[in-house]
Image: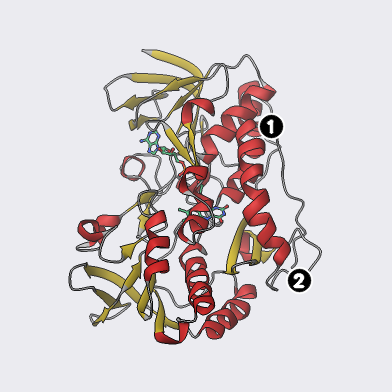
């Protein structure tokens, strides 16, 4: 039986940044991270992997090299929570006790909710930037398509990085435009929802990009079935029993997403299965020894690494205050950011807080595609991640909220 002052569930973007910050502020704190994987991925770059800009290996690091010195790495998976007993149970049956728990295991990709998908993913022109196994195959498919039908899908919200399903639409279209094959290619973006983006401020500029490339935006079409050999995708028209089957040469799938099953089935979940936390303090709504961070939370912010960057210092400040019996000072405003790669060399940088309030950090109109924002996305953000966030160097963005 193990005991730690702080136990962190998940060593992804949130888990490592929180552990590093905690160690910085309280070097003697006893901390454990439960994380089964030996490879840590910088997922925001997978869009660039799929577009042939970045090799996959540059997005991966050894987990062991990221766990801060003095923090215990428990290489296992949490299978259940006992919030009253203040412990978690691991898959190997062991119990780990804590005084404070941070729950940040990310979210779950529900590939098997789409009939026939897992059998054909990575073959027959069926690909996804949402998996490290197939992000590079996306580029193979884009490069080798010489006219035909390309379909890109987006499931119901919430998903991580809500812009990612369309980022690859623009980059693929831009590549075919440069190759001279775009006029022979029927590009469709099929989304389960009825808006291109959750924050209306950015919708006109994104619609303009879709029109520029001649992309068919098909709203309320939810992918339910793929037959790889026949190269056919079936969509349900949302809100009806109707389905439509479309043939494709390339199919880029963004899978449906939900809270991890072990969170869904626990007393920590809200009615939709996500971790139930206070949106400002990030403390659990029912258990005052449990905090949350990252994609697992039921808060309304955009599920992004940029959001984690702002959440981590809040969790750390409030967790230390709670150990010291002091009032909470940390408050998260719902910041999230989404760099929309609208062309090779151009990014629309969407930044916003709770309530869909626009929160730019740059002194130009951020609805405009920008070369500087492309430079940030391809040259700066991954360095901020590896050398800032992962090391507990607290770099937060000064954004100005517009009402
Ligand atoms: P993760 O980083 O996913 O980490 C979760 C960790 O928990 C994993 O290491 C996992 O192994 C571990 N875990 C899971 N289950 C258990 C368990 N039972 N016990 C213990 N550990 C467990 N964000 C941006 O800011 N900008 C972008 O441009 C952007 N683009 C994206 C593009 C794509 C294609 C994808 C997939 C994501 C993108 N994101 C982007 C989103 C970003 O990657 C996530 O929001 C971020 O990684 C969330 O951090 P997290 O710590 O919550 O989850």
Q: How many marks?
A: 2
Q: Secondary structure at mark 1?
A: loop
Image quadrant assignment for residue 92: top left
Residue 327's disc number: 1
Name the residue: 67% across, 24% down. Answer: 24
The answer to whether any part of residue 155 appears in the image is no
Name the residue: 62% across, 14% down. Answer: 28
Mark closer to the observer (1, 2)? 2
Name the residue: 44% across, 60% down. Answer: 158
Q: Secondary structure at mark 2?
A: loop
Estimate how packed mark 2 is, as few (under 14), some (14 to 19) or many (20 or more) residues with alpha carbons within 10 Å. Answer: few
Quadrant of the image for the N terminus? Answer: top left
Name the residue: 42% across, 57% down. Answer: 129
Residue 365's disc number: 2
Q: CA distance from mark 1 to mark 2?
A: 39 Å
Q: Position of residue 281 (x, y in %)?
A: 61, 42
Please tell me whether residue 280 is drawn above or below residue 324 in the rendered image.
below
Quadrant of the image for the C terminus? Answer: bottom right
Q: Say whether disc 1 or disc 2 marks the residue closer to the N-terminus.
A: 1
Query: Horizontal placement of 34 versus 333: left or right?
Result: left
Q: Position of residue 51 (x, y in %)?
A: 49, 62
Residue 318's disc number: none
Q: Position of residue 227 (x, y in %)?
A: 19, 69
Q: Position of residue 104 (x, y in %)?
A: 47, 39
Please tell me whether residue 297 is drawn above or below residue 23 in the rendered image.
below
Query: Horizontal placement of 390 versus 147: left or right?
Result: right
Q: Is mark 2 within 8 Å of ligand 1?
A: no
> What colour-coding does the image apply?
secondary structure
**Residue nearer the viewer, 393 or 101:** 393
Query: Horizontal placement of 239 versus 17: left or right?
Result: left
Please tell me whether residue 163 is drawn above or below residue 293 in the rendered image.
below
């Amino acid at each position: 039986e193990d005991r730690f002052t702080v136990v962190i569930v998940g060593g992804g973007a949130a888990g490592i940044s929180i552990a590093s910050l905690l160690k910085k502020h309280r070097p003697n704190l006893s901390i454990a991270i439960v994380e089964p994987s030996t490879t840590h991925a910088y997922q925001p770059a997978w869009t660039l992997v799929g577009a042939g800009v970045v090799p996959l290996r540059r997005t991966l690091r050894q987990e062991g090299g990221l766990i801060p010195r003095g923090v215990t790495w428990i290489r296992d998976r949490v299978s259940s929570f006992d919030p009253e007993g203040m412990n978690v149970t691991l898959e190997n049956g062991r119990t780990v006790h804590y005084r404070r728990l941070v729950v940040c295991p990310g979210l779950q990709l529900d590939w098997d909710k789409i009939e026939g998908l897992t059998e054909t993913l990575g073959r027959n022109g069926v690909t996804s930037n949402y998996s490290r196994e197939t992000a590079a195959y996306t580029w193979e498919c884009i490069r080798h398509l010489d006219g035909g039908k390309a379909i890109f899908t987006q499931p119901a919200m919430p998903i991580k990085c809500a812009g990612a399903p369309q980022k690859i639409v623009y980059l693929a279209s831009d590549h075919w435009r440069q190759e001279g094959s775009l006029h022979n290619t029927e590009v469709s973006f099929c989304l389960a929802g009825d808006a291109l983006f959750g924050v209306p401020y950015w919708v006109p500029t994104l619609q303009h990009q879709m029109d520029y490339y001649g992309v068919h935006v098909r709203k309320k079409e939810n992918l339910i079935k793929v037959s790889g050999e026949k190269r056919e995708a079936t969509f349900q028209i949302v809100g009806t029993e109707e389905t439509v089957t479309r043939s494709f040469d390339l199919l880029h799938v963004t899978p449906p997403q939900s809270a991890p099953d072990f969170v869904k089935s626990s007393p920590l979940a809200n009615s939709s299965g996500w971790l139930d936390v206070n949106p400002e303090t990030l403390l659990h709504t029912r258990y005052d020894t449990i905090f949350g961070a990252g994609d697992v939370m039921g808060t309304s912010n955009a599920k992004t690494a940029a959001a984690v960057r702002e959440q981590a210092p809040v969790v750390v400040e409030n967790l230390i205050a709670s150990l010291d019996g002091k009032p909470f000072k940390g408050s998260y405003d719902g910041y999230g950011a989404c760099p929309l790669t609208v062309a090779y060399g151009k990014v629309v940088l969407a930044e916003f807080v709770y309530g869909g309030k626009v929160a730019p950090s740059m002194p130009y109109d951020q609805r405009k595609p920008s070369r500087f924002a492309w430079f940030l996305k391809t040259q700066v953000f991954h360095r901020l991640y590896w050398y800032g966030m992962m090391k507990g160097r607290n770099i937060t963005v000064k954004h100005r909220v517009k009402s």
